[in-house]
Amino acid sequence: MIETREELEQLYNESIKLIKEGQVVTGKIAAIRSKEVLVDVGFKSEGVVPITEFSQSDLELGRELEFLVDSMENDAGVIALSREKAIRMQGWDKIVKFSQTGELVDGRPVKKVKGGFLVDVTGIEGFLPLSLSSFKHVAEKDILFRPYKFKIVKVNNLRRSIIVSRREAVQKEKEEAKDRLWQELKIGNIYSGMVKAITDFGAFIDMGGVDGLLHITDMSWSKISHPSEIVAIGDKIDVMVLNMEKDSGKISLGLKQRLPDPWQDIENKYSVGGTVKGKVVNILPYGIFVELEKGIEGLIHISELSWTKRLNHPNEMFAIQDTVEAQVLNIDKEAHRISLSIKQLEQNPWQDAEAKYSVGAKVNGKVRGFTDYGVFVELESSLEGMIHVSDISWTKRIAHPQDVFKKGQKVEVVVLSVDSQNRRISLGAKQLQSNPWAEIAEKYPVETELEVEVVSITDFGVFVKIDDELEGLVYASEIEKEQVSQLKPQDKIKAKVIKVDVEQAKIGLSAKL
């Protein structure tokens, strides 16, 4: 059927799109010229767009893009289209939408200005204040024209201007990364992390936005004194997730759990009563720790180091890295503890101490040390005895045992008592001579007047030297306070004997003649 002229004109008019200025339309690139591009927008004539408004990737014949109708008829009598304005208009719609939803947008800082940066956000120029930039201590050259995520914090529809924040975007990115990480983390799985901080009780590991705690007890199967023995800040390590509490944000991590527990079959490796060898890895006041193998350490308590040596600290006998041989006393698999002993490998010399050292026997020894109350003497069998300060002299008041003996000095002593069960031998030096107090009582009867030499002054009286081997006490009640205040050691005073106690080996005097 042949259409009339009127019908054809009607069909033609219906096929042409109704477009108007300010409208965004879809057009197809019809021709590409040196300075402009012809675009078919479905109108009776093609539109013209400056070629400078296209990116190189968009310049392709037949490619459909969106354009803004700038003018229905420009100076050349054709439709003027704008690719850039269409992009900006569409970008603004997105900007409004993103400002409402809080979604992050892509942008590039393009210029440093007073108080901040100008940022290109999908064709819209935004302002990034320095206070919201998070670019502290970053060089300008490392900021400009680099892609970043931003959050739109303010929109001015009238001026078509926006204010953006990189700081809030960073915070949101961190929160999103945390959420993703919490979804990904599974108990029992191994993940990489970086040591962020170290404390006395462990190390904090950055898992990529979420921090986990690697406790000191979960670092090594071996005993360690401080986390810094295993990790350092900045170390990248693989750790196992042991426990997670999303509500509190706590993650417990383990390093040793990546390796088999060396204590698992401990009973098959070591037996009570067996002999082992190991290396000293730690020395504490109460004992030494010996590494038997990687991850397994035993403790030799100070009381198990020697039958005979009196130690103030184990470092008197051992140093780190020393190799020692010991006997296994006890194994506690659950607590990961092995008790060891060195002295149990030797015969106990105290078993026949009473038979070897009879009371009253004279023996030789060497001075090993002192306390305020006596002298320690090592005997020939390596057993140790003590001379109490009261058993050093019959007649002299001994203030400090070092005034009479020297360390390393060879001495002859008398055995006073032996207690094998409590490992004690009491020795005496004064017992080498007979007790002179019966003779002293005869020589210095009560009322005997003497000239004596001041030795020391105390609150309860004045100690004086009666002769080279005898001291007495002038009681505080038997001397005037004024006289005491004027006395000093080596002064001579007059006194008389008022008491001689043979049993207590004491002689009392009075300065009140």
Image: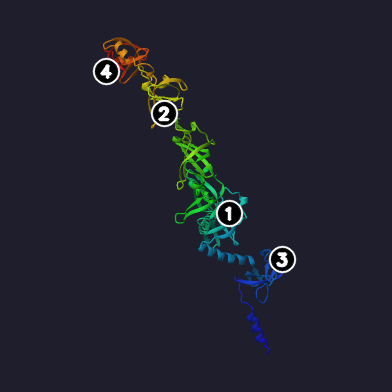
Q: Quadrant of the C terminus?
A: top left
Depth check: give the residue in front, 109 or 495. Answer: 495
Q: Nearer the viewer, mark 1 or mark 2?
A: 2
Badge 2 element: helix
Between the C-alphas of marks 3 and 2, the distance is 116 Å
Q: Nearer the viewer, mark 4 or mark 3?
A: 4
Q: Is residue 414 left or right of residue 255?
A: left
Can you say whether 112 is above or below 439 in the image? below
Residue at the spot of label 2: 353
Depth check: give the residue in front, 143 or 455. Answer: 455
Structural crowding at the residue carrying mark 1, measured as other residues with C-alpha within 10 Å and reported as few (<14), some (14–19) or many (≥20): many
Residue at the spot of label 4: 477
* Numbered tag placed on residue 117 in the rendering: 1
| Residue 382 placement (x, y as % from top left) | 46, 27
Which amino acid type corresponds to the residue marked 3 in the rendered image?
Lys
Which amino acid type corresponds to the residue marked 1 in the rendered image?
Phe
Does label 3 or label 1 sit earlier along the sequence? Answer: 3
Quarter occupied by residue 304:
top left
Can you say whether 269 is above or below 419 in the image? below
Residue at the spot of label 3: 35
Between the C-alphas of marks 3 and 1, the distance is 33 Å
